[in-house]
Amino acid sequence: MTVTSPAGPVPPGLSARPPGPALPRLLPPGGRPGGLAGHLAVLGPLPYRGGPGRLIADVAASGLTGRGGAAFPVARKLAAVAAGRRPVVVGNGAESEPLSGKDAALLRAAPHLVLDGLQLAAEAVGACRAILAVHPGGYAGGALTGALAQRQAAGLDRVPVELAEATGGFLTGQETALVSALNGGLGRPAFTPPRVSERGVGGHPTLVQNVETLSHLALIARYGAAWFRSVGTGAEPGSMLATAWQADGRAAVTEATLGTPLGRLLDLRGPVQAVLVGGYHGTWLPAGQAAGLALSNASLHPAGAAAGAGVLAALPAGRCGLAETARVTRYLALASSGQCGPCLNGLPRIAAGLAELAGARPRPTVIHDLERWAGLTSGRGACHHPDGTVRFVRSALVTFAAETAAHAAGWCTAPGAAPFLLVPADQTAASGGRR
Amino acid sequence: MTADTALWYASRATGVVCLLLMTAVVLLGILVTRQGRLPGLPRFAVTGLHRNLSLLAVLFLVIHVLTAILDPFVAIGLAATVVPLASPYRPVWIGLGAVAFDLMAALVLTSLARARIGRRAWRAVHWLAYACWPLSLAHGLGSSGDLRSGPLLWLSAACAAAVAAALAVRALAWAGQVPPASRAAAELARQEAAARQQAAAARPEAAVRQEDLLARRQAVLGGQDTALARHHAALAAGTGLAAREAGR
């Protein structure tokens, strides 16, 4: 991965120990041995600032943005929540995107870095409650309980941390859905306003940050904004975790500076036909176009894509992009919480239309219907689920236009090939009547 | 009609009008939910209708109570209009009316203070509106003989039948309601069936291919969940590259 210049001079008041090479910052190779002691030995003590609000200026100077997908400036969120009464901090490790594995990898490899970030964020907003929400898979739970016990024994945490398991499903990572679940609700996305930064967990102003964002925050508190900005681009500083799915079916979580060419994360020299950027709410790009782009919104936005949560997948040449898209869209339609009409009625219709398009000799009207439904569905829900799904579908119709023409003529690149993109199995059986 | 009988008539008439208005309000309350609505009326118009009819009912109720007190034919004290069983004339039946009047007052006051007391408290009190209607009907039937015969009896029966029918419709809709979690699945199944049917109508031989594809897709989907879990475990374990199992 890109290794750039070592850190500059350490500002006064920050940890005296200079950080090692610029990357990897979050994921130590082979994990960090020695648990809490090892973590503190390498990174130094937890740099509490001694009062709410004091860290926010550093975070603002660092230009850190949310790494959960929306890339919202963290300092603005911190300031908004700090202004409220008795705030709550939530570390979001729910990781509901099926292709993403970075949050789990981070919680496994550097749990104490995440927990440091949670404490520092709690101090920065003056929170009296901190919650860490993790994926229900269970791979993080056991180790995290141990890590929390170690910290408690060392008297490190000023705010007790509660562990919560997200309920699973594609929408659970969305912040209003997560807060609803933490409040004992159904875990469905809510209309905003009120934003969770005004009224969230227990009705208190709530800061929801991805666990990767919290880890960056913990490092910024130690080494300062200038160190954070020493990699990445001027507009998008720092590094981010990416989950890259290669065309040969292998996948890995890697840390990359913002602005790294996609060709260094994905092997695009082989028989790759297209790249999915940003996961299942993301964008399909032809492989040739993707090879000229970099992992930053400045590079990806003009192509209609976004870095999101750093999910990249290369589709090999021997697969049918339409069939892949149809299968994923079916999963996305099933993931709808069923509360907004455009999503509830639109996504199943789009999914059924795509399934027909992915089959042999679809009716010629289907593609026009898909365009019409896509226009009617997006921008009208409580959350961005319909918008993200429509973006994914539209980019597929553009990127796989040749495949669409082939299907119309009765041909398919890979008839009956095994699925390439993984989706969780269909768990909600259609049922009439009330539970 | 003399001055004495004018009050008597006014009290009876406003009582009957009140019953009609309250029946309409209750019908709107039962039939109009988040999903259901009246044909041809947007939701905000239905809420507006509900509110205005309620206010009209309150107006008629006030006239009904005032004329009943002022009417010299029977002695109903001022206290008896709010305190149940305080009336010397038919204490039980007038008392039911008093309870309904108190409930109405509570509904109006909480609705006026809704922004202040919060939606949840307001809603809890608003459920009492459903108790108002049977109380009023019983009060009407019991405290005067008018409703017990002739056209007014038919009117009361019609009101009761309308509310009962609305309750039945609502109960049926509730029983057939799909829970939100499986709404998308139900809709998807419907759309997929419709798409298959249309494709089959266009070209009978395509239907077989679609069915075949769907079955094959379902067959692999079962195995995919475990594959995904395995991949996530490998990613989390930090073993670097997780090789996808052979043949995929």
Image (cartoon, grey):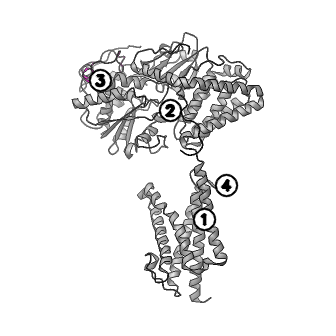
- Residue B47 lies left or right of residue A232; in this view the side is right
Kindly identify the amino acid type of the residue bearing the numbered disc 1: Ala
Q: Chain of mark 4?
A: B
Q: Secondary structure at mark 1?
A: helix
Residue A105 quadrant? top left
Q: Which residue is mark 3?
A: A223
Specify which label sits upstream in the sequence, 3 or 2: 2
**Residue B79: percent from left, percent from top:** 43, 79
Kindly identify the amino acid type of the residue bearing the numbered disc 2: Phe
Are the residues under marks 2 and 4 on the same chain?
Answer: no
Q: Which residue is mark 4?
A: B40
Per the model, the C-alpha gap separating discs 3 and 2 is 35 Å
Q: Residue at x 22, y 30 (%)?
A: A153
> Against A417, is B218 above or below?
below
Region in magenta: A16-40
Q: Mark 1 or 4, which is nearer the eye?
A: 1
Whether the magenta-drawn stretch holds residue A35 is answered as: yes
Per the model, the C-alpha gap separating discs 2 and 4 is 37 Å
Mark number for residue A68?
A: none
Pick whichever, A248 or A232, lies toward us: A248
Q: Chain of mark 3?
A: A
Mark number for residue A170?
A: 2
Q: Mark 4 or 3, which is nearer the eye?
A: 4
Per the model, the C-alpha gap separating discs 2 and 1 is 44 Å
> Tag 2: Cα neighbours inside 10 Å, few (<14), some, or many (≥20)?
many
> Against B68, is A263 above or below?
above
Specify which label sits upstream in the sequence, 1 or 4: 1
Q: Mark 1 or 3, which is nearer the eye?
A: 1
Q: Which residue is mark 1?
A: B24
| Labelled pair 1, 3 in contact (Cβ < 8 Å) | no
Per the model, the C-alpha gap separating discs 1 and 4 is 17 Å
